[in-house]
Structure formats: C-alpha cells, structure tokens
Image (cartoon, rainbow, N blue to C red):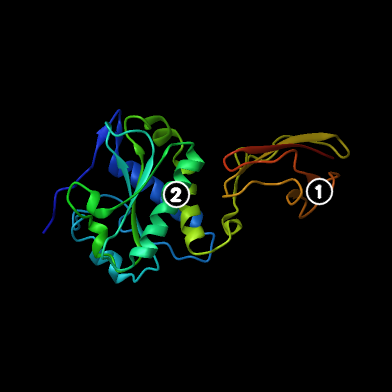
C-alpha cells in the first residue's frame, strides 16, 4: 500500500528531500567516472518505501558501504555532522565512513565540523541505518537555516565532498573522477577566408575532485589545429568548480 511522502525539514524555500536527492544524484554522476557501481534508493518521491523499510532496497544490493544524506533543521547550528551505527553490521567501518563524510563536507564547503555521534545519540535512540547490512553512515550536510546559502548554491561541492569520502573509504584515487564541463561549447560561427586570422576563447571548468596543476595538465590539440599550437599550458592552478580560459589563435 502507498505511504505518505515525508518531505523532511523545510526553510527559506529549501526542502530537505529535494536538497538531499539533488546532492546524492550529483555525487552519483561524479562517482560514475570511477570503477564504482553507485546506486540510489530513490530517484524521486517514493510512496512505496519509508525510512523504516528502505533497508529492503539497500540490503538487496549487498553494498560495500551505504550512506544516508540529510540536512539538519533550520534551528540547528551551522556545520556538517554524521552518525554511525551501534551494534550494527560494521560499527568500525561505520565510524570511519561517518568521520570521513563530516570532515570532507566541512573542509570542502568551509563549514564547521560538528563531528560524529553514535546513532543512539539521536532523539529516537537509534537510526534507520542500523538495519543496513554494510558499513553505514548518516550525514547531515548542514543546517537549513544557518547554511541555507551553500545548500542552495553549492550543491556540486557537497556532492564532491560525498564522493571524496566514498573514494577515500574505498582507497580509490581521487583522480579517477577527473572531469570537465564546457561552459561555452558553441563552435565558431561565421564566414572566414584562407589564412584569415581567427581567435576563439575556450573555457573549461574543472568538474573533478582535485586541482588541475599546470605541471600535469595542458590543453592539447587532438586533430587539425588550423594553425594553432599543438598544446597550450594551463594558465594557472584550477581548483574544482573553477574555470580555465585560453585564447586560441588559428587560421
């Protein structure tokens, strides 16, 4: 039988279920570049499951680790926090995973690290992650009140933090998640004549987990360069979420 959707906490136009799903889906996109199979318990509102029986989905997948993404309420203090299991499937792994999540979110977003607590510290005396047959953790990304601005505008960074914690836990190098976006992917449009000088700005956004270091990254022509150089050095170090710009001459 269908069940009523629990939207979670709401504040200033932010809804917990929507923030959590958006961040989780973006983390899945980043981690999909790595040799890791990432599955979500939902891709939208799910009237067939509640937090009490979502363990059916988790346990059927036999995961190496499992995590729940939440936000804290509007009256909670600023910062990232996490919970670990007590007498669960793997409490040691759960503590390590939860600590990594809280630290990664706090460091990448510049938020206070509120640390980790046992699930028995929750108001219910336990959490729904207890029944998960894997090292399990619950992370609160931040407060819907005090951290409303980053929760609204920096969800990609929250996703990167979750991906970082997962990769660190599994001892997978962060550079497996290297990626880029093309903010100006439009081609040069117009009429040109043989040997006419041309110039086109190319912008590439670092959508990975690590800095692009000029010592290791460069823009390289993989085809007909039309008179441009075979390669161009990276102008400067580019952190995740930042953009590098080249002015590319050609004929």
Residue 198 occupies which quadrant of the picture?
A: top right
Determine crowd level at label 2: few under 14, some 14-19, many 20+ residues with C-alpha closer than 10 A: some
Mark sitting on residue 231: 1
Residue drawn 57% across and 46% down?
207
Q: Residue furthest left?
A: 1
Q: Quadrant of residue 142?
A: top left
Quadrant for the C terminus, please: top right
Q: Measured from the top left, where is residue 178 in percent x and y?
A: 60, 54
- Residue depicted at 29% across the width and 71% down the height: 60
Name the residue: 36% across, 61% down.
94
| Residue at the (73%, 38%) spot, across then down | 236
How far is the residue under mark 2 from the one under mark 1?
A: 31 Å
Across and down, in percent, residue 61 comes to 33, 70
Could you say which quadrant of the image residue 97 lies in?
bottom left
In depth, the one of 4 and 121 nearer the eye is 121
Task: Give the mark nearest the N terminus, 2 or 1.
Answer: 2
- Pointer 2 residue: 26
Q: Is residue 141 above or below residue 131?
A: above
Q: Secondary structure at mark 2?
A: helix
Q: Is residue 191 visible?
A: no
Q: Is residue 14 left or right of residue 230?
A: left
Badge 1 density bin: few <14, some 14–19, many ≥20, Cα 10 Å: few
Using the rendered image of the protein, determine whether residue 11 is visible from the camera's viewpoint.
yes
Viewer-side residue, 99 vs 68: 99
Looking at the image, residue 206 lies above or below residue 31: above
- Name the spot of residue 40 as percent of width and height, x first: 35, 58
User: Toward the viewer: 95 or 249?
Assistant: 95
């Amino acid at each position: 039988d269908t069940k009523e959707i629990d939207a979670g906490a709401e504040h200033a136009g932010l809804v917990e279920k929507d923030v959590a799903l958006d961040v989780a889906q973006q983390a899945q996109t980043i981690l999909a570049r790595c040799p890791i199979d990432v599955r979500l318990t939902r891709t939208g509102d799910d009237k067939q499951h509640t937090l009490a029986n979502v363990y059916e989905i988790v346990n059927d997948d036999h995961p190496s680790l499992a995590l729940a993404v939440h936000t804290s309420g509007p009256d909670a203090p600023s910062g990232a926090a996490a919970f670990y299991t007590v007498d669960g499937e793997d409490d040691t792994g759960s503590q390590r995973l939860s600590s990594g999540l809280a630290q990664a979110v706090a460091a990448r977003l510049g938020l206070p690290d509120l640390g980790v607590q046992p699930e028995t510290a929750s108001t219910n005396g336990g959490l729904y992650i207890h029944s998960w047959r894997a090292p399990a953790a619950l992370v609160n990304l931040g407060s819907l009140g005090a951290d409303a601005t980053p929760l609204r505008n920096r969800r990609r960074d929250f996703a990167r933090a979750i991906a970082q914690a997962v990769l660190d836990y599994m001892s997978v190098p962060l550079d497996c998640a290297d990626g880029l976006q093309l903010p100006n992917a439009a081609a040069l449009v117009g009429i040109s004549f043989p040997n006419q000088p041309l110039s086109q700005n190319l912008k590439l956004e670092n959508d990975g987990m690590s800095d692009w270091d000029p010592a290791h990254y460069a823009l390289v022509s993989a085809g007909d360069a039309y008179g441009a150089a075979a390669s161009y050095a990276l102008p400067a170090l580019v952190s995740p979420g930042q953009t590098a710009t080249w002015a590319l001459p050609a004929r």
